[in-house]
Image (cartoon, rainbow, N blue to C red):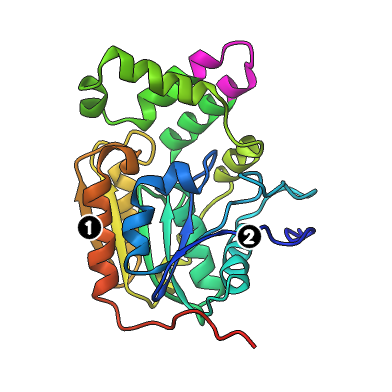
């Protein structure tokens, strides 16, 4: 698959310091996955936030998406933005993309932050994604999909504490639609398996596990942490949507991890 049939769209680039490359979730985009924490991250890093093919202004390629293709696209976007080496922070499906990018480009990746992620879909995660895709195809009733996403994306306690007005606001947000390539991105999850990559990783790794995650349950985070040599596992009391529920705690965990890393290279010098 030639994922770069067209010139790379300019990614989000913000801040200064060592590179931090963001890998968002499926059916999502950079702002949806990371928006509330980007400013905090950019205070300590040069944040590069490319959209996956099918999200934002990046069209889907002619051929089906592959994990290798998206991982290479992610790395190419960072290099195109002037960053030769970088930590990758992956969220949800972006964790598998980050792992594969580190396995394929070890000379560029200096660390990994894997949040609310998975190495491969188990039967429960497959059921979550299959239902999501089926409801999305029923374009006549977007509210049903919005209600389903609210129930699986939000942690139970967080949802219990919302007012009716806040729930309606969230339903309206989900009903407004997903990226054009959402179904192709979600379909890719069924073919992901990076378990063989995990023991080959030789960079500092932080695994962030939301304890009330109903999409990628804590079992998946434990599998990631157990498979990566010397990975550190931390937990947060929230559901899958960490940026919405626990932005401060998530940002703290990531910035503390980044501060403890050896000094990495900044942006590449321009000729």
Mark 1 residue element:
helix
Q: CA distance from mark 2 to mark 1?
A: 28 Å
Quarter of the picture containing the N terminus is bottom right
Out of 98 and 5, give the one closest to the viewer: 5
Q: Is residue 137 magenta?
A: yes
Quarter of image, res 226: bottom left
Q: Is residue 246 above or below residue 45?
A: above
Whichever of callouts 2 and 1 sits on the residue coming sooner in the sequence is 2
Is disc 1 surrounded by few (<14), some (14 to 19) or many (20+) residues within 10 Å?
some
Is disc 2 surrounded by few (<14), some (14 to 19) or many (20+) residues within 10 Å?
some
Residue found at x 55% / y 38%: 27
Q: Would residue 117 be visible to someone looking at this image?
A: yes
Q: Position of residue 175 (x, y in %)?
A: 52, 21
Q: Is residue 253 magenta?
A: no
Residue topped by disc 1: 252
Quarter of the picture containing the C terminus is bottom right
Q: Position of residue 2 (x, y in %)?
A: 77, 60
Query: Is 83 left or right of 250, judged from the image as shown?
Result: right
Quarter of image, res 262: bottom left
Residue topped by disc 2: 10
Q: Position of residue 68 (x, y in %)?
A: 62, 61
Residue found at x 34% / y 61%: 41
Start-end of magenta stretch: 134-145
Determine which of the numbered discs, if any, sits on residue 165 in the image. none
Query: Is 120 left or right of 217, judged from the image as shown?
Result: right
Mark 2 residue element:
loop
Q: Is residue 226 above or below residue 52?
A: below
Tally the numbered discs: 2
Q: Position of residue 220 (x, y in %)?
A: 35, 48
């Amino acid at each position: 698959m030639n994922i770069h049939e067209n010139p790379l769209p300019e990614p989000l680039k913000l801040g200064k310091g060592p590179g931090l490359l963001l890998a968002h979730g499926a059916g999502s985009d950079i702002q949806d996955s990371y928006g509330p924490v980007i400013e905090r991250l950019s205070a300590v890093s040069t944040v590069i936030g490319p959209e996956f093919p099918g999200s934002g202004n990046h069209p889907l390629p002619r051929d089906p998406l592959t994990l290798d293709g998206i991982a290479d696209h992610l790395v190419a976007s960072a290099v195109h933005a002037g960053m030769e080496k970088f930590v990758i922070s992956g969220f949800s499906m972006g964790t598998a993309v980050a792992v594969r990018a580190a396995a394929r480009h070890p000379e560029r990746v200096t660390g990994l932050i894997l949040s609310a992620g998975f190495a491969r879909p188990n039967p429960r995660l497959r059921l979550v994604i299959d239902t999501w895709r089926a409801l999305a195809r029923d374009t006549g009733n977007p509210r049903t999909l919005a209600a389903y996403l609210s129930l699986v994306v939000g942690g139970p306690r967080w949802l219990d504490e919302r007012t009716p007005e806040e729930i309606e606001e969230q339903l309206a947000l989900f009903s407004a639609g997903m990226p054009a390539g959402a179904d192709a991105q979600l379909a890719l999850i069924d073919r992901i398996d990076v378990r063989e990559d995990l023991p080959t990783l030789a960079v500092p790794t932080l695994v962030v596990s939301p304890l009330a995650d109903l999409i990628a349950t804590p079992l998946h985070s434990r599998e990631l942490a157990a498979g990566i040599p010397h990975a550190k596992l931390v937990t947060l009391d929230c559901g899958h949507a960490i940026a919405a529920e626990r932005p401060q705690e998530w940002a703290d965990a990531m910035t503390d991890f980044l501060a403890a890393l050896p000094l990495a290279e900044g942006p590449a010098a321009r000729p």
